Amino acid sequence: MGRAKGWAGKLSEFGEYLKKHGLDRDVVAGAAGVTPSYVSMLAHGKANPGFKRAVAIERWTHETVKDSGGRPAPFSCVDWDV
């Protein structure tokens, strides 16, 4: 039996961001150059990205994720609770 899609459990600020914007761990993993399980670790606060990875995530979310007004809604480097 496979895992259910979506985000559940206690989530970090990044996990809440992913949930809010309906971002799938496989899509984020591909864009960030990491595994889906690492994205899950980030989403649940079990890992923190290095600087280069955080910048890559910020750039990708800035280009890809939009708010309800169509403006970029990035998860920035300063949003990581490190």
Image (tube, helix red, strand yellow):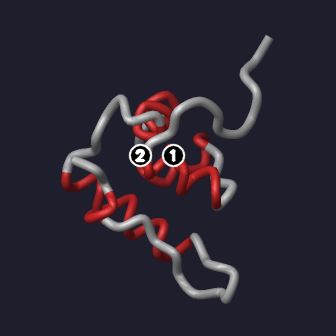
- Please identify the residue farthest to the front as the structure is shown: 10
Mark linked to residue 33: 2
Give the residue at x 64% y 58%: 20
Quarter of the figure that contains the N terminus: top right
Up-down: is 20 above or below 25?
Answer: below
Residue 35 in the image: x percent, y percent? 47, 33
Residue 82 in the image: x percent, y percent? 22, 47
The amino acid at mark 2 is Gly
Q: Dot 2: few (<14), some (14–19), or many (≥20) neighbours within 10 Å?
A: few
Up-down: is 1 above or below 8?
Answer: above
Give the residue at x 57% y 52%: 18
Q: Dot 1: few (<14), some (14–19), or many (≥20) neighbours within 10 Å?
A: many
Up-down: is 15 above or below 55?
Answer: above
User: What is the number of callouts on the image?
Assistant: 2
- Which residue is labeled 1 in the image? 15
Residue 31 lies left or right of residue 2; in this view the side is left
Residue 1 lies left or right of residue 38; in this view the side is right
State which quadrant residue 48 falls in.
top left
Please state which of the two labelled residues, at mark 1 or mark 2, is closer to the viewer: 1
Give the residue at x 60% y 41%: 26
The amino acid at mark 1 is Gly
Residue 39 in the image: x percent, y percent? 47, 38
Residue 2 lies left or right of residue 80; in this view the side is right
Q: Distance between the Cα atoms at labels 1 and 2?
A: 17 Å
CB-based contact (under 8 Å), mark 1 and mark 2: no
Give the residue at x 58% y 41%: 25
Query: Which element carries disc 1, helix, strand or loop?
Result: helix
Closer to the chain start, of discs 1 and 2, is 1
